[in-house]
């Protein structure tokens, strides 16, 4: 082989090797891009903080970036394509689907609320019936608006029987304390803050009376699920580890310290509110993902109720195929 032909061969070989390496490295570079996951101030969402602080995602081989939001802005960030995943109340997934047409898939149920969402009356109001003609502060169109409706139904009242005042959930304690409203609908930790600011306030109704109505979930974009399925399976495995850790009597105190520190709540206080969220293991996820069952108790049944509520309150117009927004494949890969 001549010097010229040898040089040409080496150049061609080097080029082929470069192209080959680039092809091999490209997926790695793509996989190294962190999954961006939004979370906000609700106990089952804050539970992820345990895994973040302990480095469990790194141990699981998945690169994630959890981004802290106020709740409503987190919905905006997801619907505008700034996040791969979002911790969200299941009924609010339909809100962003109906309002912005943002596609999403529920892949994991973190809990259903078991008392952590409440309707609270000012001193002197002791029952839901007494709300007739009264002002109720609630973040209109979001999850506790639905809870308010269901609580009113229980005593034979309709939404038209109360005066709705649109109040951001984090502002509901101040709204009740200032006398702006007669009652509020909110979730933890705003519930506890309300009782601190308004001595004598009373719980009139809570999600404990309707278990399985309000699910809290992790939703992801269909594109991210299709391209990063193995990573989302790894995230779900980490969730199982989180649930075990925060429920273990040996580690619950440390868990409450980590979670309380995330949002400035005393660990002792956090330990009191945490049981109001019924965390779901992966096995519980499997059961709750069952399709076709009506009423509270499955994700499908709860979202059918939410869809009816959203359309009745003109949050969006067209009926949503709620099953199309659920994908149990991540859970199915882990629980047979």
Image: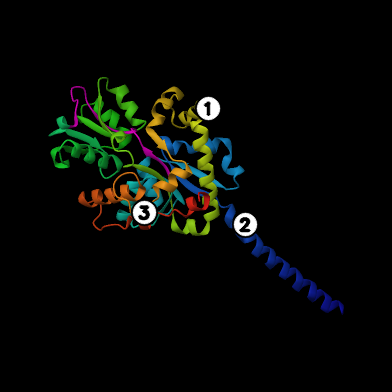
Q: Marks 1/3: CA distance?
A: 37 Å
Could one spot residue 102 in this view of the protein?
A: no
Query: Mark 2 sits on what residue?
Result: 28
Query: Mark 3 sits on what residue?
Result: 291
Q: Which element carries disc 3, helix, strand or loop?
A: loop
Q: Residue furthest top?
A: 199
Q: Is residue 126 above or below residue 70?
A: above
Disc 3 to disc 2: CB gap under 8 Å: no
At a point 81% along the width and 74% down the height, the residue shown is 7
Magenta highlight range: 109-128
Q: Which element carries disc 1, helix, strand or loop?
A: helix
Frontmost residue, 128 versus 172: 128
Residue 254 bears which disc, if any?
1
Q: Quadrant of the N terminus?
A: bottom right
118 inside magenta stretch = yes
At a point 52% along the width and 33% down the height, the residue shown is 245
Q: Please tell me which of labels 1 and 3 falls first in the chain.
A: 1
Residue 66 appears at what percent x and percent y? 49, 43
Q: Marks 2/1: CA distance?
A: 35 Å
Q: Is residue 212 above or below residue 336?
A: above
């Amino acid at each position: 082989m001549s010097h010229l032909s040898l040089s040409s061969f080496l150049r061609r070989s080097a080029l082929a090797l470069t192209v080959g390496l680039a092809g091999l490295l490209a997926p790695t570079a793509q996989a190294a891009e962190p999954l961006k996951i939004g979370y906000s101030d609700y106990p089952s969402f804050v539970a992820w903080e345990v895994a973040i602080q302990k480095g469990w995602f790194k141990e699981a081989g998945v690169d994630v970036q959890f981004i802290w939001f106020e709740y409503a802005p987190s919905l905006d960030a997801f619907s505008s394509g700034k996040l791969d995943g979002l911790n969200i109340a299941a009924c609010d997934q339909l809100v962003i689907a109906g309002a912005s047409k943002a596609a999403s898939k529920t892949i994991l149920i973190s809990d259903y609320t078991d008392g952590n969402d409440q309707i609270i009356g000012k001193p002197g109001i002791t029952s839901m019936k007494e709300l007739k003609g009264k002002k109720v502060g609630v973040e209109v169109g979001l999850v506790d608006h639905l809870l308010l409706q269901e609580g009113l139904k229980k005593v034979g009242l309709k939404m038209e029987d109360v005066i709705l005042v649109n109040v951001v959930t984090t502002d509901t304690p101040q709204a009740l304390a200032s006398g702006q409203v007669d009652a509020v609908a909110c979730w933890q930790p705003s519930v506890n803050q309300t009782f601190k600011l308004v001595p004598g306030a009373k719980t009139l109704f809570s999600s404990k009376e309707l278990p399985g109505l309000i699910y809290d979930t992790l939703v992801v974009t269909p594109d991210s699920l299709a391209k990063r399925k193995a990573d989302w399976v790894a995230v779900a495995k980490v969730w199982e580890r989180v649930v075990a850790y925060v429920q273990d009597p040996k580690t619950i105190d440390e868990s409450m310290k980590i979670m309380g520190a995330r949002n400035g709540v005393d660990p002792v206080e956090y330990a009191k509110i945490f049981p109001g969220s019924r965390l779901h293991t992966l096995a519980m996820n499997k059961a709750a993902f069952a399709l076709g069952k009506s009423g509270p108790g499955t994700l499908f049944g709860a979202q059918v109720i939410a869809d009816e509520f959203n359309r009745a309150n003109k949050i969006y117009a067209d009926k949503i195929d709620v099953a199309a927004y659920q994908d149990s494949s991540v859970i199915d890969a882990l629980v047979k």
